[in-house]
Amino acid sequence: MSDHVTTHQAEEDARNEEILIFLNGRIVPKAEAVVSVYDSGFMLGDGVWEGLRLYDGHWAFLDEHMDRLFEAAKAIDLDIGMTPACMVQALEETRVANDMTTDAHARLMVTRGVKSRPFQHPGLSQKGPTVTIIMEHSRPSIPRPIRLATVPHIRGLPMTQDPKLNSHSKLNCILACIAAEKAGADEGLMLDVNGFVNTTNACNFFIVRKGEVWTSTGDYCMNGITRQKVIDVCRADGIPVFERNYSLVDTYGADEAFLTGTFGAQTPVSEIDGRPIGSGEMGPMTERIRALYKALVEDSAARA
Ligand SMILES: Cc1ncc(COP(=O)(O)O)c(C=O)c1O
């Protein structure tokens, strides 16, 4: 039996069979939330998305998520057809319809919409965007620290498909994840074009060495909101934190390593390419940063 773990593993929740989904201005039961086979997202991965988490009635770092979504849409020349305020209202309507107050995860997706013919040209998407919000009851349940394997798939240069875009097409990351699982790990550790350690296929990546926290320069990875918040809380709490180039040698020799993302906040890493990292359990710095991040989320909810 496989003991694979994923960084987005949640407790089973039967209520998720009954959720209501936002689809182009309507709120419909899950079974009716379907899009056309001509949709640009389905056909070509032509769209952008955000993942948000609800804590105590508030979407954590909502403004940052909206900024990133609208920036990505602008970058791919996709007119969302809604203001950020309308998008927040749609999120809120979906939350209220689902009677969710905490421990929910939203996947907000915008594609270039239904095409008139089954070909690539963006001009064939003439009907306006497809906007959907899936909102699920969600309590992360990751039973053990994550094992990583370095994979041959790299984070590319921004002039091909900028790795900062949260695009619907994640094939590069999916192939990285498949390669890592085939190597007996849970998630793929991806290098940048220069061979420095960059990120994993679904999360940002940090190491801890001698009391210092290191992450990549940020040049080739998703501009993760959790990543930035971890950097911010480290700075505010006097923890030395560096965005820098570092190699696998530095990484294998780290005292701790952890992943960041909206879903799991900070997830400890036990092993990389068969080398144990630290004790193999969550280390004291990771624990400290988790507590600081939790306090930040609570504080921003209290201020909202
Ligand atoms: C490749 C990748 N890295 C990192 C992240 C984490 O970003 P955030 O902290 O904004 O959830 C994501 C999530 O969308 C991602 O897809």
Image (spheres, helix red, strand yellow):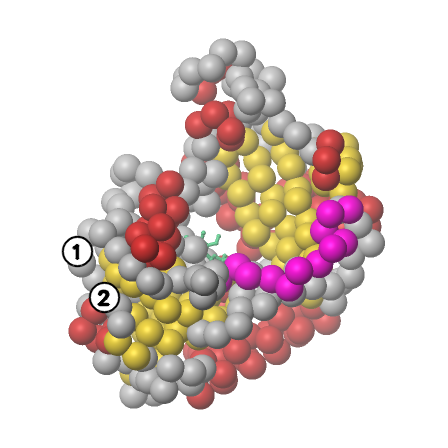
Q: Is there any visible trace of residue 194 in the rendered image?
A: yes
Image location of residue 188, percent across then percent down: 34, 58
Check whether the beta carbons of the residues at disc 1 and disc 2 lie within 8 A of each other.
yes
Give the residue pinned by disc 2: 245
- The answer to whether residue 55 is left or right of residue 197 is right
Q: Residues within 10 Å of mark 1 (few under 14, many from 20)?
A: few
Q: Is residue 239 above or below residue 220?
A: below
Camera-nearest residue between 101 and 186: 186
Distance of mark 1 from mark 2, alpha carbons?
Answer: 9 Å
Image location of residue 231, percent across then percent down: 43, 71
Where residue 39 sits, quadrant-wise, is top right
* Quadrant the C terminus occupies: bottom right
Q: Residue at x 54, y 66 (%)?
A: 264
Q: Which mark is residue 62?
A: none
Q: Residue at x 44, y 74 (%)?
A: 145
Q: Is residue 266 above or below residue 217?
A: below
- The answer to whether residue 6 is left or right of residue 94 is left
Q: Residue at x 45, y 82 (%)?
A: 282
Residue placed furthest toward the top: 117
Mark 1 belongs to which amino acid? Answer: Asn
Image location of residue 209, percent across then percent down: 29, 83
Which mark sits nearer the N-terminus, 1 or 2?
1
Image location of residue 66, percent across then percent down: 58, 48
Mark 2 belongs to which amino acid? Answer: Asn
- The answer to whether residue 240 is left or right of residue 44 is left
Give the residue pinned by disc 1: 194
What are the residue bounds of the magenta stretch?
7-18
Query: For numbered disc 1, what is the local secondary structure?
Result: loop
Q: Residues within 10 Å of mark 2 (few under 14, many from 20)?
A: some
